[in-house]
Image: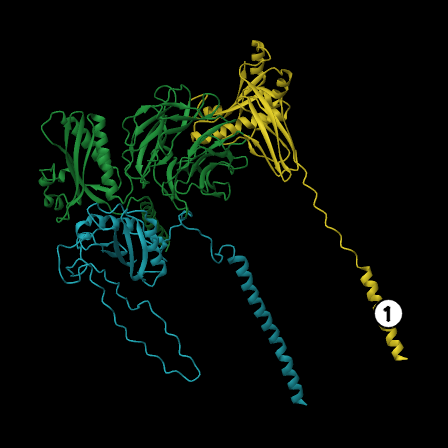
Amino acid sequence: MATSRNIFFERAEWRRPLAWSAVLHGSFFLALFLYAVFVHAPAGDTWGADDTGSAMSATLISRVSIPLPPNPVQTENVLADQSQGLSKSQPKAVEESPQALPIPRLGKKPKPQLRTSKAQPHTPPPEDNTVPYGEGGPAAIPYSTFTLQSMQGGLNLGGTGDFGRLYGWYVDVVRRTISQNWLQYEIDPGIYSAHRVYLTFDILRDGSPANVQIEQSSGVPSLDQSAVRALQRIDSFGPLPAGYRGNRVSVEFWFDYKR
Amino acid sequence: MKRTPFIFSILVFASLADAQQDWIRTGTGLGVEKVRLAAPGLKPANADPALGPLLQTFNTTFWNDLDNAGIFEMVSKSFYPLQTPGSPPEMRLASWANDPANAGMVAFGNLALQGQQCVMLGWLFDVKNSGSPQVLGKTYSDAAGDDGARHLAHRFANDIIYRLGGAINGITLSQIAFISSRSGHKELWLMDYDGAAQHQLTRLNSISLSPRISPDGDRIAFVNFGKGVQLAMFSVELNRTVAFPSFGGTNVTPAWSSDGRKLAFSSSMRGNPNIYVSDASGANLRRITEGPGPDVSPVWNPKTNSQIAFVSGRSGLPQVYIIEADGANLQRMTDTGYAVSPSWSPNGQFLAFAWRRNYGPGAPGGQDIYIMDVATRQWVQLTHDSGLNDFPSWSPDGRHIVYESRHGARSEIWSMLADGSKARALTSSGNNSQPNWSFK
Amino acid sequence: MSRSYFLFIALTISLLLIAGCAKKPAPVAAQPAPPPPAPTASLSANPDAIEAGQSTQLTWQTQNATDISITPMGTVEPNGSRSVSPNESTTYRLTAKGPGGTQEATARVTVSAGASAQGAVSETEAQAFARNVKDVFFDYDSYDLRPEATASLQSAAAFLEQHPNLSFTIEGHCDERGSTDYNLALGDKRASAVQDALVKDGVKGTRVRTISYGKEKPFCAESNEQCWQQNRRGHFVLQR
C-alpha cells in the first residue's frame, strides 16, 4: 500500500520537471532563433555577397591565362646543338619498352593500352639532297633556329642543298612571316608544354606555301592546327631568290611549345 | 586580404594589354621582331655638283620610307662606320655586322646624272652572311630633279620592303586623298603617302566631302553640295569631274568595292537614309538596309567584297554594324558610346573606326581611333588623349592608318602604324580632314 | 435442300457482281487546263509636271503578275504608290511579268527648273513667311520633334495653307560635335521630320524640298551649349 502510493508519487514527480525542461529548452531555442533573425541577419553578409570589387572591362575577351610573348630576343646562339652540318641533327629515337600486358583472365579482355603522347617520334624522311649529319660544311645557316618566349623552333630547308647558306635572309623572312601569322590564342589554354611538332611544306617559285603537312604531331591537336592555320594564312613569302634555279624549296619546320 | 584583388587586376590588365598588342601585330603584319636595317644612303658616282641636292632629297626620303615602313629597326646613323660604301667592292661586312652597328641588313648604292636622267645603282646586303651577302642589286632611273630623286627613293625602298617584309608591297608610291579648306572652300586634294606634293584637284567653289579613291587609282568618288547633296566623280586622268547620276534626297559617303565594280553609299532617296549599292556607273541601284536608320558610312570588306560595315543610329547613338552585301545577317559590332567612320583592313581581319566610349554632353574623354578584330570582337584603342580623332583609313599594306586629328578648330591629317606607334602629322596648314588612302 | 440453297447464294453473288460491273462508270476524258490569264499593268504619275526639287506621286496597279519592277526604282509590290522627286524629266516604265506573259506601262514626268511659276513673291509675303514659319530646334543627337516644335509647325502649316503659292526648303543642321558624315544623315532625318509634320498637317508635299547640311553651315561658331542648340535646327528657306 505504501509502495503503490510511493510509485504514484514518483510518477507525479516527473511531470513537472519535464514540463520545466520543455519550457526552458523551447525558450532557449526561441531566443536563439529570434536573435538570428532579427539581430544578425540585416547586418550580416548574405551568402555569395555581390561585392563586385574592381571592375574589369567586360569587352576584353582575351584569355587571361595566356601571357602572350613580348618582343622576343633573337639569341646569338644560332645552333641549338653541336651539329656542324647544314641540316639539323635528327632527334634521338627514344626506345620505349613495351608495356607489360597483364595476364589475361579467362573470359575477360585485356584492358586496352593508353597511348601516351610520348609516342615513338618517327624520324622525318631525310631529304635526298641535304648534307648528311656530321660531314661538316661551311658556316652555320644564319637565322635557322629561333626562340620566342613560349616557342622554340627551327627550320630545315631542302632544295638544292645550300639554299639556306646562300639565301639566309630568305629563311629569315620565312621564319618571321610564320611567327607573325601564328595566333597563339588558338591553342588550348590548358596546354602548358607540348612536344615537338614537325610540319613540312613546299615554297613554290612565286613564294606561296603549298602542300602543308603535319609530319609528326605533338599530340596536342589544337597546337598542330594552329601551326597549319598559320601557314594557310600566308599568301606568299616573296618570290624565291632569282639566283636559285630550282622550282620549289621544301621546308621542314618544327617547334616545341612551352607556356 | 583586401589588397589582393587590386594587385591581381593590375597584373591581369598588364598581361591583357600585352595580349592586345600582340594580336594586333600579328594580324597587321607588323611583326613581333624587326630586321635591323642600316641605310647610309647613296653616294655620288662622280664629282658632279648637281648631285648634292639630289642626294640630299634622296637620302632623306629614303630614310623616312624605311623608318616608317613598320618592319625595320633602323640602326642609328651615329653607329655607322666612318667609311660608307658606294658599291659592293667598298663594302666591309664586318664593320657593319659587329658592334656598335650590329646591323642585319645594309642598303647602299650610288647615284649619277646622265643627261636628263638620274640613274642609281642600289644594293641590299645581308651582312651576317659572309658567303653570299647580296639580297638585291638593281638599277633605277628617273627624270633628273627633285621629284625624280624622291621617286627613286620610293622605288628602291619599295623593293627592300617587299623582299624583307614577306611579299607585301610597300606603300611608298601610294597616295592619300583628303579635303582641305585652304582655298576658302572645302575642295578635294591629293598628296603622297608621306605628306609630300599636296595639290588641289577640284575647283568647284562649293562644299565637297568624303573622297574615295577607286581601286585602279583613276577616279575619286566624293560628295558635292553644288546641286543638292549628290555623289560626284573626279577623273584623275582627265583632271576634271565626270558625269555621275544624281538621285533624290541626300546622297553621301561613297565606298568602292575592292574590284572596282560596285559603289556603296548612303541615300535618302526613298525617305530614310539607308545603304544602297550600285554599279560603278551608278546603274542597277539596290537598297541594302531597311528601316528608319539613319544608315551612313558604308565600307566593303576588301578581301571578299561580300560584307559591308556601316554606321547606324537605329538604336540611338551611332554604332558600327556589319551586313552581308545582299542585305542579310545584320550584326552589331559595338555595344556602347558613339562609333562612326569604319574602315576595313586589306586582309579583311580588322575594322578601324572612331569611337567615343563615354558619350554625352559634358562627358570626359575624347574620340579616339580603335581597331576591332571582326571575328572575335576584341578591340584595342590606338590613340590616346590627343584631340578628337576621326576618319581612319587603312594603308594598302595593312600596317598603317591615316586619320584626322582635331584640336579645337584646327584639324590636321596624321599617320601612324597600326599598333598606334609612330604617329606623325602629314599636314600642317589649313583645315584638312577626311583622308582616304589609295588601294595601291 | 442445301444444294438449291447453295445455288441460290451463288446466283445472288454473281448477279451482284454483274451489277457491280455494269455500274463501273466510263472513264472521263481529261480536259486541258485553262490558259493562265495575261497580266495587266497601269502606271500614272500625279502630277506629271513638276519643278526641280518637287516630288510627284507614282501610282500603279497590276494583275496576274508575279514579277513587277519599275525602272529606275527596282522591284516593287504589285499595287502601290510612291513619292519620287526626279531632278530631270524621266519616263518611268513599269514591267509586269507573269505566267501569262509580260505587260508594260509608262508614265512620263516632266521636270522644269527655275523659279516658282506661280508668280513672284512679294516682300510682305516674305516677311509674313519669316514671322509665321519659324525654325524648329532639336535635342542632342535626336530628330524627334519637341512638343513646342509640333505646335509651332501646326501654326506654320495653317499659314502655309493660306498662301499656297509659297514654296520653300527645309534645311537640317547639326551642331559641331559629332562626325561629319553621321551629321549629314542626322540633318536629313531632322529635315524629314519637319517635312512629315507639315505634310500631316495638310501642306502639299510638292511645295517642300529638304536638304541636309550636317554641320557644314553652322549659324554660330562658339563652343558652348547655346551655340550648339542654335545649330541643331530645321531651318526654313523661302524659295523666291
Q: Secondary structure at mark 1?
A: helix
Which image quarter: residue C62? top right
Residue at the right extreme of this rendering: C1
Which image quarter: residue C132? top right
Task: Write the residue at 30% across / 68% down.
Answer: A118
Which chain is mark 1 on? C
The amino acid beneath tag 1 is: Thr
Q: Nearer the viewer, residue A9 or B20?
A: B20
Which image quarter: residue B65? top left
Colour treatment of the image: by chain
Q: Nearer the viewer, residue B341 or B264?
A: B264
Determine whether A67 is above or below B68 in the image.
below
Q: Is residue B388 left or right of residue A169?
A: right
Q: Nearer the viewer, residue A138 or C32?
A: C32
| Colour in which chain B is drawn | green
Q: Which residue is mark 1?
A: C12
Residue at the bottom extreme of this rendering: A1
Neighbour class for label 1 at 10 Å: few (<14), some, many (≥20)? few
Which quarter of the rendering shows the C terminus of chain A?
A: bottom left
Which quarter of the rendering shows the N terminus of chain A?
A: bottom right
**Horizontal and vertical percent for residue A48?**
47, 57
**Horizontal and vertical percent for residue B372?**
39, 43
**Horizontal and vertical percent for residue B207?**
42, 22
Instruction: Kindly tell me whether residue C156 is visible in this rendering.
Output: yes
Q: Nearer the viewer, residue A38 or B425?
A: B425
Chain in cyan, by letter, is A
Chain in yellow, by letter, is C
Q: Is residue B290 left or right of residue A146?
A: right
